[in-house]
Image: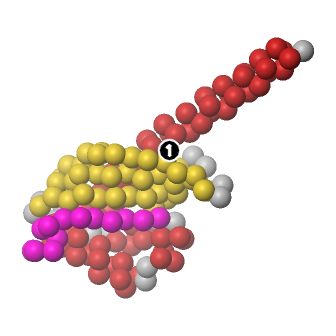
Amino acid sequence: MGIARYLVLLLLGSALLGTTGCNVSSSRQHAQAAVDVFHRELNAGDLDAIWDGADDQFRKSVSRQSYDKFVGAVHRKLGRAMRSSNQSWSMHSLNLQTSIVLVQHTEFEYGAGTETFTFSVQGDGVKLIGYHIESTELVTL
């Protein structure tokens, strides 16, 4: 009886790990695709699309006026995002909410920067909850 119970628990644990692994991989792919969409919208100067597509948590953390100033300055000073490569990523779960953070090295028309995107994982997709950029050119141009 003890061995059978142990095997059942082992199988359940393996099934849960397998499901989580697929979710992690899928969430990372969705987040990477969302970075590409962010850059396309930024390149087009479509700040409304970025704002509207972000999570409520993002919109509650910053006023629309501050967001427009900041993201507008990124677009104006650095220009179009040309190439972006993932430097690192991590996934966190707290209070039944999962987030994924991607750190990207991005080359723009007029410089480069390290962008940090934070997304909430929602079902089969992700939504932006945070954006940060470090760029010498952003402050000096």
For residue 28, what is the image quadrant? top left
Residue 125, horizontal then vertical, whole percent: 53, 50
Where are the magenta residues, as a range? 129-141
Residue 122, horizontal then vertical, whole percent: 58, 53
Q: Is residue 3 magenta?
A: no
| Above or below 5: residue 120 | below
Residue corresponding to mark 1: 27
Amino acid, disc 1: Ser
**Residue 53 in view, yes or no:** no
Residue 112, horizontal then vertical, whole percent: 15, 58
Name which residue lies at 90% across and 15% down: 1
**Residue 73 in view, yes or no:** yes
| Above or below 116: residue 30 | above
Left or right: 102, with 114 as reference point: right
Q: List the single residue furthest toward the right.
A: 1
Residue 59, horizontal then vertical, whole percent: 48, 75
